[in-house]
Amino acid sequence: MKKVVLAYSGGLDTSCIIPWLKERGYETIAVVGDVGQGDDFEAIKKKALKSGASKVYCLNLQKELIENYALPALKAGALYESKYNLACALSRPLIAEKQVEVARKEKAQGLVHGCTGKGNDQVRFEVTYRLMEPKMEVIAPVRVWEFKTRDEEIDYAKAQGIPVPVTKKSPYSIDTNVYGRAIECGVLEDPWKEPPEDIYKLTTDPKKAPNTPAYVEIEFTQGVPKKIDGTAYQPLELVKRLNEIGGKHGVGRTDMIENRLVGIKSREIYENPAGAILHLAIRDLESLVLDRESLRFKEALSLKYAELTYNGLWWTPLKAQLDAYFEKYHETTTGTVRVKLYKGKATVVGRKSKFSRYSEKMATYGEGDVFDQSLADGFIKLWTVPYQK
Ligand code: ARG
C-alpha cells in the first residue's frame, strides 16, 4: 500500500476520504492542525482511527499561526478586498507545511486534502505541497469522487462504520481559528438577506453589547503589538484577549461579497474582533509616525500582499520581498493607540509615539503657530506651473 498524509478535520468529508483511499490502495496518516477551532481533539483522533487511519498526528499550531502568519499579515496591512483579515487563508499554508513535514518523516508518497474544487483552499494547500515537495502525489478526493449528495456520503460513511453525528447538520459552512471565523452557505447565499443573529459566535449582537464603552490601549514596538493597557502579552495571548474584549462589545463583524480565485463571487461573513482592532490601531499609529509618501506607497503593497495570501502564494519570492519591505517600513511604528469599543464599533480616540511626526506648533490655529503662511503664495504659484498654458 502507498502511504499518504491527509489534512484531517474530523468532518464527514475527510472521514470518508480515509476508507475511500483504502479502497484504492492507500494507507492514510491523518494530520490534525489545532489552529484554535476549539474542537475536541481526543474525539477527532479517535474518529480518524475509527475511519481507518493508520496513525494520527495532532499538532498545536496556534502560536505559529499568530506569530508567523497573522503578525506578518498585520504588518503588511493585508486586508483582502480592503475587508477580510485572511484568517482562513493564513492557516492553510501552515497546515500544509506541517503535513509535508509529517510526510517526509513518515516517508509517505502522497498528500491529501478534503477541499472542494470551487474554493480557494485547494489552491492554498496544493501550491504549498508543490513548492515543498514537487514530486509527491497530490490527491483531492472531493473533486473527483462519486458522491453527488451529502446523503450519499452519509450512507457511505455508515457502511464504513464511520460515526455520523445524529444532530442535524448546521446549514452553514464555518471555518474557525484563533484569528477569526468565517461563515457561509445556507440563507447567507442570498446577498440581499441580512445574516441571522445565530450565525455569530465570537461577537455579541451590538445592540445587546454593554452600554458603557471599553477603552483599550495597545502598545506596538516596530509594528508588533506587545501590550494591552500596560500589560505585556505573547502574541497569541494578546490576540485572545482582544477577541474576548472586542467580541464582548460586538466588534469585528464583516459582511462581504468577495472574489474567489476560481472566479466565483461568494458572500462571506467574518467575525474577527482582534484582527479588526489590530488593523485599525496599527494603521492609525502609522499615520502618526510615517511621512506622506511612505504611507501612500505602502497602500498598493498591502493590497498586493493580501492578494498573494488569498491566492495561495504565501511561499513565493514576492511575498518574502514584501515582508522585508514591511520590516523597514515599521522601524518607527512604536507607540500606543487608544481604542474605544462600543456597540459594534472600534474607534481610535488617541495615539502617541516617540517617533511622532505630528507637530502641534505647525498644525495649530491657536497660540504658538510656527507655520509661515506668507510662504504659501509662492508655493501655490510654483505648484500651478506645470498646468499653465
Ligand atoms: N472565503 C474565505 C477564504 O477563502 C474563507 C473560506 C472558508 N469559509 C467557510 N465559511 N468555510 O479565505
Image: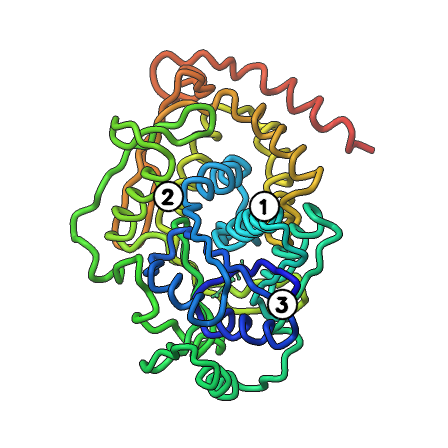
Which quarter shows the C terminus? Answer: top right
Image color mode: rainbow
Three-letter code, disc 3: Tyr
Q: Depth check: 141 or 225 in front? A: 141
- Expressed as whole percent of the image width and height from the top left, the position of residue 85 reads 48, 50
Q: Earlier in the sequence, mark 2 or mark 1?
A: 1
Q: Which residue is mark 2?
A: 277
Q: Quadrant of residue 296?
A: top right
Q: Which residue is mark 1?
A: 105
Q: Depth check: 39 or 267 in front? A: 39
Three-letter code, disc 2: Ile
The residue depicted at 48 percent of the width and 58 percent of the height is 55
Q: Label 1 near label 3: C-beta < 8 Å?
A: no
Q: Depth check: 362 or 131 in front? A: 131
The residue depicted at 74 percent of the width and 50 percent of the height is 134
Other-residue count near label 2 (Cα within 10 Å), few / some / many at <14 / 14–19 / ≥20: many
Other-residue count near label 1 (Cα within 10 Å), few / some / many at <14 / 14–19 / ≥20: few
Q: Earlier in the sequence, mark 3 or mark 2?
A: 3
Is disc 1 placed on a helix, strand or loop? helix
